[in-house]
Image: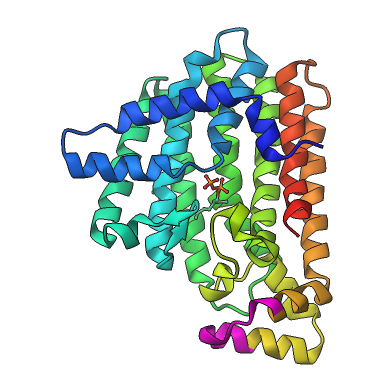
């Protein structure tokens, strides 16, 4: 199986073109805003959402993908802006392998850069007409809803798996769905193509967030670009944590609770062992796999094409990144 980097290298040219659009749209005559915006784009990231947008478009039309680059870049800008705001909320100092903007240029400036990128994103989305603009705006509203629902459940030791799923639907899966939905609507695709690619993307997003939450425990910051145990540090009770709190032996549960209450005492090595012992990583991995199976099921009847193959490979890569980093 390919690694994400190998998979992405086949799409290297497209990533470059998305980056060109990003650099061009964020340009500002205000030099400091220009510099700070460039800093966030230069930090990179996987460009997962624009690639999903491009592949969904190419799977549903014979038109050149160049026509969808602005929308692809727009989704990446919303995603990047939400990460800037998320890093402010979490007081994070590292993202995408470099210092966060809130640490480098201060919280006040980071808020404004995030707002600026949102504004630029909606300008890009508006180039595709009201229907696509609405899809983009609705996905952003959902992001905010997911973020607030998560915030309201911080430290909530009684949080259910259902609430966790609702949070990740809103903050990740619907955004992935919007990438495919916007692309297929812009392509003028048939209703069943719109539906199957959108359902694929939604389930891919669910699996992506579950694996992201696993990597918060088992990941290696050399690959993820961010430290581990950020969720525990910020009291976000993700699926592996919910499961471990319910299923760990008593002394391990006490250790997790102590670490949740006593941030400075986080012993990462020990905590990782406890999570592995509780079965929470295996359990969360099995949940992610189910979402991937559902995602792939939606493409089963799609017309065979290299783009559908790439989407199928992407689905497998999402869960395999766990094994790579474990
Ligand atoms: C949109 C109006 C509006 C508000 C934003 C702060 C906020 C409200 C939302 C943040 C939601 C959030 C942090 C979602 C996380 C999603 C996620 C899985 C991020 C990591 O994505 P990757 O791994 O990151 O694709 P890279 O760096 O590779 O792009």
Q: Residue, x 29% and y 54% (percent of image)?
A: 111
The percent position of residue 238, horizontal first and vertical second, equals 64, 66
122 lies left or right of 288: left
Q: On the rendered image, what quadrant is the C terminus found in?
A: bottom right
The percent position of residue 105, horizontal first and vertical second, equals 27, 57
The residue range painted magenta reads: 258-269
163 lies left or right of 264: right
The percent position of residue 237, horizontal first and vertical second, equals 61, 71
The quarter of the picture where residue 14 lies is top right
The quarter of the picture where residue 309 lies is top right
Rendered view: 139 above or below 158:
above
Of the pair 5 and 187, the residue shown nearer to us: 5
Residue 190 visible somewhere in the drawing: no
Q: Residue, x 68% and y 28% (percent of image)?
A: 197
Residue 19 visible somewhere in the drawing: yes
- Which secondary structure type mostly characterizes the magenta part of the structure? helix
Of the pair 72 and 224, the residue shown nearer to us: 224
243 lies left or right of 150: right
Q: On the rendered image, what quadrant is the N terminus found in?
A: top right
């Amino acid at each position: 199986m390919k690694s994400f980097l190998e998979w992405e290298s086949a799409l290297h040219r497209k990533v470059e073109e998305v980056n060109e659009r990003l650099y061009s749209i964020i340009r500002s005559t205000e030099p400091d805003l220009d510099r700070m915006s460039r800093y966030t784009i230069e930090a990179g990231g996987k460009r997962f959402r624009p690639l999903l947008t491009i592949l969904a478009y190419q799977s549903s039309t014979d038109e050149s993908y160049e026509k969808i680059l602005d929308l692809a870049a727009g989704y990446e800008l919303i995603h990047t802006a939400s990460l800037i705001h998320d890093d402010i909320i979490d007081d994070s100092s590292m993202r995408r392998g470099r210092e966060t903007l809130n640490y480098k240029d201060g919280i006040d400036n980071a808020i404004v850069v995030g707002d600026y990128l949102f504004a630029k994103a909606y300008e890009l989305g508006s180039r595709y007409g009201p229907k696509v603009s609405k899809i983009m705006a609705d996905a952003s509203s959902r992001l905010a809803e997911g973020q607030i629902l998560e915030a309201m459940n911080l430290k909530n030791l009684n949080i259910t798996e259902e609430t966790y799923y609702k949070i990740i639907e809103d903050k990740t899966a619907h955004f992935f769905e919007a990438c495919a939905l916007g692309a297929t609507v812009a392509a003028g695709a048939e209703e069943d193509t719109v539906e199957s690619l959108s359902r694929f993307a939604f389930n891919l997003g669910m699996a992506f967030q579950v694996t992201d939450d696993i990597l918060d425990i088992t990941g290696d910051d050399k690959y993820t670009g961010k430290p581990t145990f950020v969720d525990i540090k910020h009291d976000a009770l993700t699926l592996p944590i919910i499961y471990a709190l319910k299923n760990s032996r008593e002394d391990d549960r006490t250790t997790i609770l102590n670490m949740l209450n006593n941030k400075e005492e986080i012993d990462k090595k020990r905590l990782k062992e406890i999570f592995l012992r509780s079965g929470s990583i295996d359990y969360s991995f099995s949940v992610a796999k189910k979402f991937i199976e559902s995602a792939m099921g939606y493409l089963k009847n799609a017309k065979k094409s290299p783009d559908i193959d790439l989407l199928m490979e992407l689905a497998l890569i999402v869960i395999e990144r766990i094994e790579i980093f474990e």
